């Protein structure tokens, strides 16, 4: 298509037509750039200006004219803050089809919004047009040479200004339609592959985050059991490296596949149990520390998951706690420091009622305990999250803050994950298991720790999974208005 024939923005009759047009334009742009790259590899001939003009993301515009009083809707998303034109560039529209249709159907039905689709001025960086990336490593042409002729990832064009409320409105320009534009999404999709060892398409909308590999072992055992159960809704398990376990395999074949997964090559390996209706569960072993916690959630957020839950270990801070007890966080003393500019520590991170209730009910179902019996094992309170694993060496300085916060547990990830959920509008929750009591002489010694792990990990993981089962039936109310700002983009 010559540069002067690139599609202008055109009105479309329905959300379905809008998404179909986005898919067509995106596929055409990817195919055009792949063809130009292949031609360059083969002949050294660079694309013309007209050819390069085709390497652009499609753009979606939603127009709300507000001819009457805006409707009052209880849901937290798919709402306009006022009349105007809202726009975003879109990548991978075929994958995001269900998400896009959900948002657009609400906006058209409830507000009479008008939809337009066209080609944006935002170029698709050339590393994003190939699936694996190794197609570019052919040795004949350097990255510097490719950058002379093809669009490159520009950090100046990839940011979280919309999510962080730092975008600037200019009269005559569209307002943001979504938290992340196409370049930001593509950037994170590739980072997810790098860190998790998974095709980003395998990541499920219900996410468990943990800081111990022992949870992975238990998750895989449980998932394999689900696949052998004819009544289970799960259909396959995807391991790091793309290793897939399907239904119907015998034990020896499953064991061989599990052993062949190269999980150790990846910094934060992920495991995906796929549900037949698309609402499966992903478990990510994020490792230890707030840097990892922020890193992975920065990227998971572009997939717009329904929820992420932290299920990991913590140090108990109260004499009444026992090793193996649970901590349901309802507040966070954030000493992780990594988000101090984006979400300053004085900004409260609210507990989400739906998640709190689901985690407590899940604990009751799995343990078989309720009332006072459950309260003896599951305590609700504040968790302090540090960036320093050896915070105990600064106890004289930290003592007053911990006392003032009334914290009952300490870890290195939960406060960061909750703050990221708040910041990026992803429902969040924390259920930790007490593995030691550093203030009371019960430290992690190898023998005691191993006995604790064997006893506690399975039950803890099952509580997290049971909570997800409960939350699946509450998707509309789960996306809380507590997470939305006064000038929020319409899309969830």
Image: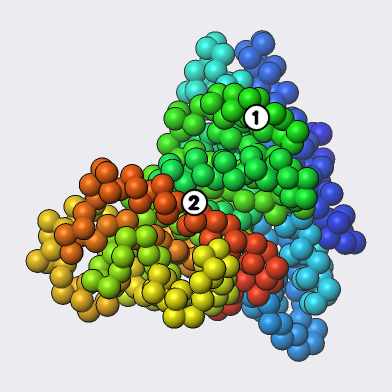
Q: Residue furthest right?
A: 13
Q: Which mark is residue 446?
A: none
Q: Residues within 10 Å of mark 2 (few under 14, many from 20)?
A: some
What secondary structure is marked by label 1? helix
* Left or right of 263 in this view: 320: left
Query: In the shown orientation, is residue 395 left or right of residue 125?
Result: left
Q: Position of residue 479 (x, y in %)?
A: 62, 70
Label 1 Cα neighbours within 10 Å, binned few <14 / some 14-19 / many ≥20: few
Which residue is at 72% across, 57% downward? 99
For the residues labelled 1 and 2, the Cα–Cα distance comes to 20 Å
| Residue 348 appearing in the image | yes
Q: From the image, which quarter does the C terminus lie in? A: bottom right
Q: Which mark is first along the chain, 2 or 1?
A: 1
Residue at 78% across, 50% down: 231
Residue 249 coordinates in the image, percent (x, y): 72, 30
Color theme of the render: rainbow
- Residue 141 lies, in percent from the top left, at 53, 15
Please say if the residues under marks 1 and 2 sit with CB atoms less than 8 Å apart.
no
View extreme (bottom): residue: 69
Find residue 251 and name its label. 1
Vertical relation: 314 (above or below) 354:
above
Identify the mark at residue 458; answer none if there is no mark.
Answer: 2
Image spot of residue 134 (x, y percent): 57, 21
- Identified at 84% across, 49% down, the residue is 20
Nearer the observer, 306 or 8? 306
Q: Quadrant of the N terminus?
A: top right
Residue 353 left/right relative to 204: left
Q: Is residue 122 visible?
A: no
Q: Residue at x 48, y 57 (%)?
A: 460
Of 25 and 131, nearer the camera is 131
The answer to which image quadrant residue 37 occupies is top right
């Amino acid at each position: 298509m010559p540069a002067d024939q690139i599609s202008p923005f055109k009105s479309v009759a329905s959300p379905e037509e809008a998404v179909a047009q986005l898919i067509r334009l995106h596929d055409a742009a990817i195919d055009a750039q792949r063809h130009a790259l292949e031609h360059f590899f083969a002949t050294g001939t660079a694309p013309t200006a007209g050819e390069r003009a085709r390497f652009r993301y499609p753009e979606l515009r939603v127009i709300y004219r507000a001819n009457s009083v805006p409707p009052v809707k209880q849901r937290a998303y798919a709402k306009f803050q006022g009349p105007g034109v809202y726009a975003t560039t879109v990548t991978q529209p075929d994958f995001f089809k269900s998400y896009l249709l959900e948002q657009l159907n609400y906006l058209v039905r409830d507000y009479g919004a008008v939809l337009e689709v066209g080609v944006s001025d935002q170029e698709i960086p050339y590393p994003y047009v190939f699936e694996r990336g190794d197609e570019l490593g052919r040795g004949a042409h350097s990255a510097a040479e490719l950058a002379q002729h093809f669009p490159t990832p520009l950090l100046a064009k990839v940011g979280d200004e919309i999510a962080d409320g730092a975008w600037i409105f200019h009269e005559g320009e569209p307002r943001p339609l979504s938290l992340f534009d196409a370049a930001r999404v593509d950037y994170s999709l590739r980072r997810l592959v790098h860190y998790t060892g998974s095709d980003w398409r395998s990541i499920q909308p219900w996410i468990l985050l943990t800081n111990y590999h022992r949870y992975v072992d238990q998750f895989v055992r449980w998932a394999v059991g689900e696949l052998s159960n004819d009544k289970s809704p799960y259909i396959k398990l995807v391991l790091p490296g793309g290793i897939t376990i399907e239904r119907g395999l015998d034990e020896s074949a499953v064991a061989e596949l599990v052993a062949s997964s190269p999980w150790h090559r990846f910094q934060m390996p992920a495991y995906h149990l796929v549900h037949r209706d698309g609402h499966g569960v992903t478990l990510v072993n994020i490792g230890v520390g707030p840097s990892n916690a922020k890193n992975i959630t920065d990227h998971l957020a572009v997939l717009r998951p329904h929820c992420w839950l932290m299920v990991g270990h913590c140090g108990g801070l109260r004499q009444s706690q026992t090793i193996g007890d649970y901590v349901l966080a309802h507040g966070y003393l954030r000493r992780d420091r990594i988000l101090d500019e984006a979400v300053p520590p004085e900004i409260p991170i609210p507990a989400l009622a739906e998640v709190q209730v689901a985690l407590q009910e899940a604990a009751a179902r799995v343990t078989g305990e309720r009332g006072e019996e459950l309260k003896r094992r599951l305590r609700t309170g504040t968790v302090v999250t540090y960036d320093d694993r050896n915070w105990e060496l600064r106890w004289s300085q930290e003592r007053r803050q911990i006392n003032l916060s009334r914290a009952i547990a300490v870890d290195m990830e939960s406060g960061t994950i909750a703050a990221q959920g708040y910041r990026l509008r992803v429902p969040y929750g924390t259920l930790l298991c007490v593995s030691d009591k550093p203030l009371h002489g019960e430290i992690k010694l190898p023998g005691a720790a191993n006995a604790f792990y064997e006893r506690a990990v399975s039950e803890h993981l099952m509580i997290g999974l049971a909570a997800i089962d409960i939350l699946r039936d509450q998707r509309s109310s789960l996306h809380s208005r507590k997470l939305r700002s006064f000038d929020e983009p319409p899309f969830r």
